[in-house]
Amino acid sequence: MNLPFNAYFQGKIVPYSEAKIGVLTHALNYGTAAFGGIRAYWNADIEQLFIFRPHDHYRRFINSARLLCIDLDDTPESLTQSTVELLRADNYHRDVYIRPLAYKSDELIGVRLHDLNYAISIVAIPFDRYIKNDTSAHVTVSSWRRVDDNVIPARGKISGAYVNSALIKTDAARAGFDEALVLTQEGHVSEGSAMNIFIVKEGILVTPPVTENILEGITRKSVIELARQELNLEVVERPVDRTEIYLCDEIFLTGTAAQVTSVTKVDHREIGNGVMGPITSGLRSLLGDVMRGKVAKYRQWNTPVYADETQTKAFEAAAASNPK
Ligand code: PMP
């Protein structure tokens, strides 16, 4: 993986090589950091880079930090502005992944959350597919359990909690699977290692509710809205049993990195008729257009990076000609 060109670090944009922290930094030793994962999509037709739902991502980022007793001075708007400036400095003309981090920055010994300083960094790197086999993924049910709200809150994107995701992912990969689903302590389906899950049963879209130790995904939220508004689908948020996933018609995973990944096999059992189903493929292509700023109705989800006037006008015209 290539390193980023620049970093937003200590309040300004610096070359990435200058964004350095000491080995005693609290967050590095104790996992006391909150992070985000945002994508920006290049729209080649109008030569514009669009950040997807940055305000929603940064609202979650600020809340994740609050769980660590970090009260950020920044707002979703100011963090989005810093991200735009960083992407302009990097001058990317391709899809990228953006990683903001709010971390306990003191260099000292002592496990706690209070009486510590924090710092923020943001970097962006070129990024394409996260799950190679995203049209027919084979997943397993992990033997690990999802971190519980009363252990480390999964609704925060908290660095230390990602050891849980890493354990899940590595065991799945070493056993030859593309991904894994993880169950709650009670044995309900929670999510994937870094993605939410949807199943389709008799035309209804079902996904675990926010009380099942999931991260409240921005892609999940987008898919729910698109499914209801554009595909007229019923979407139900309710606990999902393990064997429901063996017997449903379609399964897909959603996430900023994973986008909409079709799952066609779980633990060697074929799902539906063993290929990507029509609801999964419909949502994949609709969300793909929306994320690239090609659908007028959802343009408020796309923040342009290169806001020069000609491009903005061209964008308006392109969006108006595709009014979904
Ligand atoms: N669950 C977990 C554990 C994740 O890390 C992610 C990725 N951020 C998601 C779900 C999907 O969230 P989003 O759609 O906001 O990327």
Image (cartoon, rainbow, N blue to C red):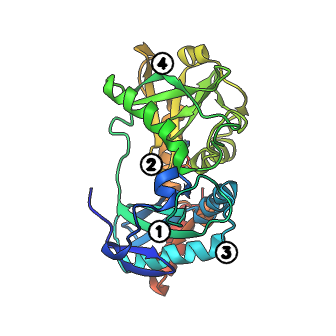
Q: Provide the residue designation for mark 4.
A: 271
Determine whether the residue tagged by mark 2 lies in a helix, strand or loop: loop
Question: In the shown orientation, is residue 318 left or right of residue 130?
Answer: right
Mark 4 or mark 1, which is nearer the start of the sequence? 1
> Mark on residue 257?
2
**Distance between mark 1 and mark 2 Cα atoms:** 17 Å
Quadrant occupied by the C terminus: bottom right
Mark 2 or mark 4, which is nearer the start of the sequence? 2
**Distance between mark 3 and mark 1 Cα atoms:** 15 Å
Do callouts 3 and 1 mark residues in contact (Cβ within 8 Å)? no
Front residue (pair 47, 195): 195
Do callouts 1 and 2 mark residues in contact (Cβ within 8 Å)? no
**Distance between mark 3 and mark 2 Cα atoms:** 27 Å
> Mark on residue 73?
3
In this view, the mark in front (1 or 2): 1
In this view, the mark in front (3 or 4): 3
**Callout 2: CB less than 8 Å from ligand 1:** yes
* Mark 4 closeness class: few <14, some 14–19, many ≥20 residues within 10 Å: many
Outermost residue toward the left in this view: 2
Badge 4 amino acid: Ile
Q: Provide the residue designation for mark 1.
A: 122
